[in-house]
């Protein structure tokens, strides 16, 4: 048996593992009456997460760059789901999304911060921030903190923030507070790593604020999946990506498993401030466990 086969077949304490799918980890669950928000709902992990959770009975609040795209993605899932415009790289759009949620009056039982961009080949800046940091971290932070501040989360709500094992590729100091837009030190993977470390630190800091309540916040590494997230990568990666995916990478069905597991599985209801991979608690980098760095961020 190959090493790849051994890794894919391994299961952890949860009973699930690398090869588990989102359908498998939610089997038998009835999510009727649960409102779950998913960002990046139009493709990849976001679309699969929405599909599976809707199949289990949840009402999906699906966020995309515009409401039309969100509506098109949710249409095959059945009636009653809610499309929302939420352009994470535009703080005004994110705040408008929070306003729209508040006007509806629904409370969310889960918020899955799934959307993101990865490894932009050249530095891009919007609203004074490097685009990956703005989209992956700040946009989601505005959304989550807006929902908290407007009391849009149910008493037992779970916030799930997609980080990545790439948080280990952040700059040596973790977050470059004196060069946050990376004007002096931009590299595609360093910038992506900084944004993913920020996701992890944000989840840890939010979890501390949820302490003593039934609400939780956790970060997840979904695995390495060939999705539209890699659309900014070079030609070689785009050509070889499907080949690599067939050999060793997770499928989208497997990639969505950990975030679905953390968002809805009963066994995770009281886990707070953790970093998950392959549906089990995992060890992050030392920077990812630094409470002072999280509070400064």
Image (cartoon, grey):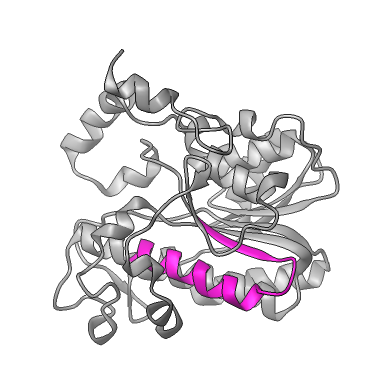
Residue lying farthest to the top in this orientation: 1
Horizontally, residue 88 falls left or right of residue 237, namely right
Residue 212's place in the image compared with 246, above or below, is below
Instruction: Check residue 198 for magenta coloring.
Output: yes
Image coords of residue 265 (percent x, y): 69, 44
State the quadrant of the N terminus: top left
Image coords of residue 200 (percent x, y): 44, 64
Horizontally, residue 264 falls left or right of residue 124, namely right
Residue 267's place in the image compared with 127, above or below, is above
Residue plotted at (79% across, 42% down): 31
Residue 145's place in the image compared with 251, above or below, is below
**Location of residue 180 (image quadrant):** bottom left
Magenta stretch in the rendered image: 195-219
Q: Nearer the viewer, residue 276 or 146?
A: 276
Q: Nearer the viewer, residue 152 or 88?
A: 152
Q: Nearer the viewer, residue 141 or 92?
A: 141
Residue plotted at (37% across, 46% down): 229
Image coords of residue 295 (percent x, y): 45, 82
Q: Nearer the viewer, residue 230 or 225?
A: 225
Instruction: Check residue 160 for magenta coloring.
Output: no
Residue plotted at (81% across, 66% down): 104
State the quadrant of the C terminus: bottom left
Residue lying farthest to the front in this orientation: 13
Residue 43 visible: no
Residue 187's place in the image compared with 257, above or below, is below
Residue 136 visible: yes
Tag count: 0
| Prevailing secondary structure class for the magenta stretch in the rendered image | helix
Residue lying farthest to the left in this orientation: 184
Image coords of residue 205 (percent x, y): 52, 75
């Amino acid at each position: 048996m190959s090493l790849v086969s051994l890794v894919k077949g391994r299961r952890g304490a949860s009973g699930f593992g690398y090869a588990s799918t989102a359908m498998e980890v939610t089997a038998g669950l009835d999510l009727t009456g649960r409102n779950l928000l998913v960002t990046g709902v139009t493709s990849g992990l976001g679309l699969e997460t929405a599909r599976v959770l809707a199949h289990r009975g949840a009402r999906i609040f699906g966020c995309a760059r515009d409401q039309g795209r969100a509506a098109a993605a949710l249409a095959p899932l059945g009636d009653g789901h809610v499309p929302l415009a939420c352009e994470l790289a535009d703080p005004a759009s994110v705040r408008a999304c929070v306003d729209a949620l508040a006007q509806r009056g629904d409370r969310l039982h889960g918020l899955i911060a799934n959307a993101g961009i990865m490894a932009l080949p050249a530095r891009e800046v919007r609203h004074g921030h490097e685009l990956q940091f703005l989209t992956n971290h700040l946009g989601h932070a505005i959304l989550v903190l807006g929902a908290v501040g407007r009391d849009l989360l149910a008493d037992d709500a779970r916030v799930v923030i997609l980080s990545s094992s790439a948080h280990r590729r952040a700059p040596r100091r973790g977050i470059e507070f004196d060069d946050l837009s990376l004007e002096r030190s931009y590299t595609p993977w360093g910038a992506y790593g900084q944004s993913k470390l920020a996701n992890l630190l944000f989840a840890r800091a939010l979890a501390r604020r949820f302490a003593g309540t039934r609400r939780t916040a956790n970060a997840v590494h979904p695995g390495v999946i060939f999705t539209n997230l890699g659309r900014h990568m070079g030609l070689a990666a785009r050509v070889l990506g499907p080949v690599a995916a067939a050999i060793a990478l997770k499928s989208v069905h497997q990639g969505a498993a950990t975030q679905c597991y953390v968002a809805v599985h009963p066994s995770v209801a009281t886990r707070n401030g953790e970093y998950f991979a392959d549906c089990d608690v995992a060890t992050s980098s030392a920077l990812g466990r630094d409470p002072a760095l999280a509070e400064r961020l």
